[in-house]
Image (tube, rainbow, N blue to C red):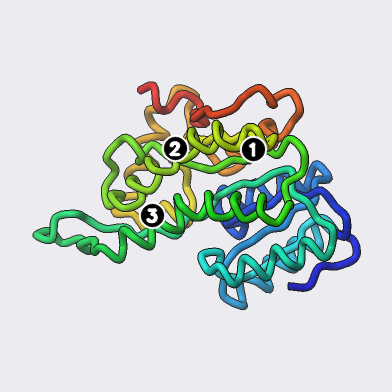
Amino acid sequence: MEIGSQFTGQSMALVLGGSSGLGLASVKKLASHGIPVLAWFRERRAREETLLAEFQSQYPSLILPFNGDITKAEVRNQVWNSCQAAGIQFHVLLHSIARGSPGTLNPNTHQKPLTALDFNLTYDAMALNWFYVLQELIQNKLPAKNMCNLAFSSRGGHRVLPGYAAIGMAKSALETLGKYMAVEFAASGIRTNVLEIGITDTPALSVLPNSKILLEHVAQNHPLGRGTQAEDAANVVYLMCQPEARWINGAVIPVDGGESLI
């Protein structure tokens, strides 16, 4: 991984899954406030080139993109070694990986039945990976003082959504994991919180059956008259990074404008 001189010695935000949806909106929000961001994603070459051009034109010298498989330990170690050599530390970690398998538990339906592999891959990418990364950051002395550790969850962790069984299980585990991380890493100056985002029109949602119907239902019944947007989530990420939020630790915070109340 090549790191330009403009990032040497910087205190940065690390966004995992920073190429679309909530993650991309958060990368842009942080960069728009002058916060340097390492945006980690896994994309095809054409999408990567589009992102690089957008980052460079809109946020020059603020976004360090990296295209690689976050689930592979050898790839993560490459990044940590490069960051150590450049004197980079992270004051924000945001887990926004949306690599889950949609499908049904019941094989006697028209939907794709979930397999053990589907569950394992989803659980590893969307829950455990958050812990792996934070643990490795600590081992490599990469967290800055008073680090803000965040992850995105959803209503599917405790409410049934069509085709969401494997992802919902991972989200439920993510929220529980966040509580333990909040306690066990507090002594290291790291505060951990989970942001439970309302139903949002993202590429990850679009793979679920009847996602358009779900979005329409939310918009029609939402207390504030519209569904959650990716920028709403990004705004709260920025708020949680501020010094005034340092006494919030171990919380699962609804970011849905009241959607979960109806």
Instruction: Note whether residue 246 is visible.
Output: yes
**Mark closer to the chain start, 1 or 3:** 3
Q: Which element is circle 1 on?
A: helix
Residue for badge 2: 175
Q: Is residue 255 left or right of residue 68?
A: left
Image quadrant in which the N terminus is located: bottom right
Query: Which of the 4 image quadrants contains residue 32?
Result: top right
Q: Tell me whether circle 2 and circle 1 mark residues in contact (CB < 8 Å).
A: no
Residue 242 position, x and y percent, is 74, 30
- Position of 91 compared to 9: left or right? left
Q: How crowded is mark 3: few (under 14 residues within 10 Å), some or many (20 or more)?
A: many
Which residue corresponds to mark 1? 237
* Residue 122 in the image: above or below residue 251: below
Q: Can the viewer see residue 235 in this picture?
A: no
Dot 2 alpha-carbon crowd within 10 angstroms: few under 14, some 14 to 19, many 20 or more = many
Q: Which residue is label 3 attached to?
A: 123
Give the residue displayed 90% in from the left and 61% down from the top: 6
N-term-proximal mark, 3 vs 2: 3
Query: Looking at the picture, which amino acid does disc 2 mark?
Result: Glu
Task: Give yes or no for contact between labels 3 and 2 (Cβ–Cβ under 8 Å).
Answer: no
114 vs 229, left or right, is left
> What is the quadrant of residue 39 in the picture?
bottom right
